[in-house]
């Protein structure tokens, strides 16, 4: 079993930045690819970014490529999502996920464990 605790959401103006953190516990953190997803009101959960077990491989949705950066610190069992140049369309609840075999698994069903989600609101 893996427990994921997400922090760092909030309200920011367009063009601003936020950093989300996801702290994992319960089993060896470095055995899983980790991912971030988001869900806006009335929309399905969508893939944002993922990172390989060792952190050398990353994968991004086209909508965030060049603006968001995923990273991980296996010594701290934490994965991060640095979000820059935020846009109003980035407004959503952001979820951390664990358990996928590779960072190329961008379907939510590929991830076994989920954090509680954190609200990110970008005002125009």
Image (cartoon, grey):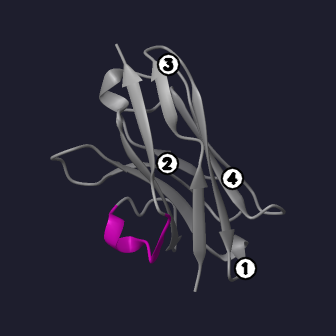
Q: Give the CA distance from mark 4 to mark 2.
A: 10 Å
Q: Is residue 110 magenta?
A: yes
Q: Which residue is mark 1?
A: 28
Q: Mark 4 or 3 closer to N-term? A: 4
Q: Which residues are magenta?
A: 107-115
Q: Nearer the viewer, mark 2 or mark 3?
A: 3
Label 2: few (<14), some (14–19) or many (≥20) C-alpha neighbours in 10 Å? many
Q: Mark 4 or 1 closer to N-term? A: 1
Q: Mark 1 or 2 closer to N-term? A: 1
Residue 85: numbered disc: 3
Q: Residue 107's spot in the image, x, y percent?
A: 33, 63
Q: Which quadrant, please, contains the C terminus?
A: top left
Residue at the location (40% across, 31% down)?
A: 121
Q: Quadrant of residue 90?
A: top left
Residue 56: numbered disc: 4
Badges 4 and 1: C-beta atoms under 8 Å apart? no
Badges 2 and 3: C-beta atoms under 8 Å apart? no
Q: Give the CA distance from mark 4 to mark 1.
A: 18 Å
User: For the residue labelled by badge 4, is the local secondary structure a helix, a strand or a loop?
Assistant: loop
């Amino acid at each position: 079993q893996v427990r994921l605790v997400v922090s760092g959401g909030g309200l920011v103006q367009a063009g601003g930045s936020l950093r989300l953190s996801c702290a994992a516990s319960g089993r060896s953190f470095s055995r899983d690819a980790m991912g971030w997803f988001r869900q806006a009101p009335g929309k399905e959960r969508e893939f944002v970014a993922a990172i390989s077990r060792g952190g050398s491989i990353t994968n991004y949705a086209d909508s965030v490529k060049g603006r968001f950066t995923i990273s991980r610190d296996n010594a701290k069992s934490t994965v991060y999502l640095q979000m820059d140049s935020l846009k109003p369309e980035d407004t959503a609840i952001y979820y951390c996920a664990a358990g996928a075999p590779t960072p190329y698994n961008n379907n939510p069903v590929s991830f076994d464990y989920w954090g509680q989600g954190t609200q990110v609101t970008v005002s125009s």
